[in-house]
Image (cartoon, rainbow, N blue to C red):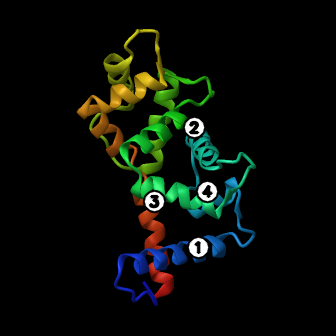
Amino acid sequence: MGNCTGSSMEELQACESHQWYRKFMTECPSGLLTFYEFKRFFGLSNLSDTSNAYVMTMFTTFDMNDDGYIDFMEYVAALSLVLKGGVQQKLRWYFKLYDIDGSGCIDRDELLLIIKSIRAINGIPCETSAEDFANMVFDKIDINGDGELSYEEFMEGIQNDEELLMTLTECMDLTHIVQKIQGEMKTKNS
């Protein structure tokens, strides 16, 4: 990674953070990432309206102070979640992402829309169709049968079902996008 020669974990993490900061400031010198820059930054172009709406939802969830921009600290928090976040953190983020209308519950259409969008962006094949996966989620964890998943139903249901948890984490994994950026950083720094 260029001039990163540290051998301790702290030195390597500091060097990696510096590289991410350089990438961020090179791509957006203002220090604030707009939605358009966010898409460009992650190589997301020529998206369908549905996928574009998903990316906007993702952008909004990373924009923690709701100012319409992602600053470097929000960017680091997003990368940390994608790369190093625990199951609880990721599930909490998935719930916020799926709850498109902000109602505090996820309905089948919201879940299906997000699953389809994420899969279109990821380009990673999944064994289960988006419709079958959405139906499986609701069949297994919509405890009260009201057609909506509360935060509690979602968190408890996913964590208590190994198959759902594995499928969700595999098909919704965004680390390949981050790895693409890391590869570009290594190329520029070599």
Q: In the shown orientation, is residue 87 left or right of residue 109?
A: left
- Tell me what residue is drawn at x 32 percent, y 23 percent: 136
Mark 1 → mark 4, Cα distance in angstroms: 12 Å
Q: Which badge, 2 or 1, is on the more N-terminal residue? A: 1
Q: Nearer the viewer, mark 1 or mark 3?
A: 1
Q: Which residue type carries mark 3?
A: Ile
Q: Which residue is mark 2?
A: 50
Answer whether residue 158 is visible to the viewer in this image. yes
Name the element at disc 4: helix
Q: For the N terminus, give its image quadrant.
A: bottom left
Q: Which residue type carries mark 4?
A: Glu
Q: Which residue is mark 1?
A: 21
Mark 2 → mark 1, Cα distance in angstroms: 31 Å
- Tell me what residue is drawn at x 43 percent, y 52 percent: 174
Mark 3 → mark 4, Cα distance in angstroms: 17 Å
Q: Which residue is mark 3?
A: 177
Q: Which residue is mark 4?
A: 74
- Tell me what residue is drawn at x 26 percent, y 29 percent: 161
